Amino acid sequence: MLNCPDLDPAIANAAYMEFRASAGWLFDETSEEMFARGRYALAAIEDLRPATALEARVAAQAIASDVHAADCLRLAAEHRDDLAKVTRCRAQANAMTRQMDRALRTLTTLRKERGAREAWKVAFEMPREPWPKRASAADPASGPASWAGRASAADPLPEPASLADQLAEQASAANPLPEPASLADPLAGRAFPAYPAPVPAFGASDPVLPAALTKAEQFAARNPLLASRIRAAGGLTRKAIAGFRPSSLPDDATVEALVYGAGPVVATMDRANGTVE
């Protein structure tokens, strides 16, 4: 008889009889060794703790397959001198072991499904708080079970403000404080000097030094397009240097010579730009 506390005694007896029919040689009472092996197999079924009839049957099949696999290995050891018998016994033991593994996986799946069903059953059968009764016309305040009573109890009305607080609020509304300049406009009320337009550094007629003009003419000879753009734009603007690498741009002295210089190369650039006819 199986000792399974979660299983009905009649189902446990049926599973025991099925297992005993599958491995009857384990219950030979004349052999103490065989009887101990049978009790050992029944203890393995009890350790699986089946709770339903299907789980009990799968558990009995799993342990029966394991018992047959162990018996096949015992026969292979007895006939170890016969290679054919040893091979057949070991192959049968492998087949029984695979069947036991499949039965144990099936038993694990059945347990998970049963646990999920029991969890849902407990969740749906849990006692819940009844809905509050609606207030009738004869008795508007039917009791503290109404939603209005619960809301007022959970969130009471604020206490009225004192007379001093009301007077202070009226005074602040009549004479509001001026908004800080940092929040309204941080630049409001400031006078910014008008920066003069760039003027030549060395005079109006010929402000560029001869060395800088020579360097600018050499740059214009190497990069005529960039030099013409700088001359037309009046400096290194985004439009003038668009498409050129930063390493190809001239220095400040060369830019000043290209913009304010006068010479045959500069005159050629002016004609190319259309500033001189």
Image (spheres, rainbow, N blue to C red):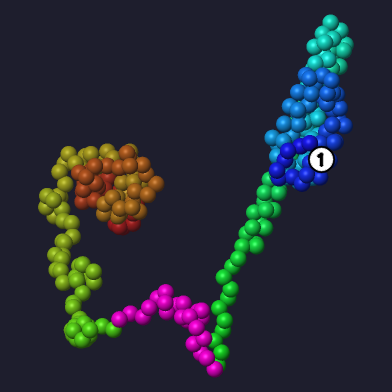
Where residue 90 sits in the image (x, y, percent)? 81, 17
The residue lying furthest to the front in this view is 30
Task: For label 1, count other residues whose C-alpha is less than 10 Å away and answer few (under 14), some (14-19) or many (20+).
Answer: some
The one nearer the camera, 233 or 176, is 176
Where residue 116 sits in the image (x, y, percent)? 67, 51
Residue at position x 81%, y 30% in the image: 64
Q: Main secondary structure of the magenta part?
A: loop
Q: Quadrant of residue 162?
A: bottom left
The one nearer the camera, 112 or 270, is 112
The reply to whether residue 54 is in sight is no
In the figure, is residue 268 to the left or right of 79?
left
Residue at position x 40%, y 76% in the image: 155
In the figure, is residue 173 to the left or right of 148?
left
The residue lying furthest to the top in this view is 81
Residue at position x 14%, y 68% in the image: 191
153 magenta-colored = yes
In the figure, is residue 107 to the left or right of 172?
right
The residue lying furthest to the left in this view is 203
Provide the secondary structure element on which disc 1 rests: helix
The reply to whether residue 123 is in sight is yes
**What residue is pinned by disc 1?**
13
Residue at position x 17%, y 39% in the image: 211
In the rendered view, would you say 192 is above or below 40? Answer: below
Q: Quadrant of residue 59?
A: top right
The one nearer the camera, 235 or 172, is 172
Q: Which residues are magenta?
A: 138-159
In the rendered structure, which amino acid carries the disc numbered 1? Answer: Asn
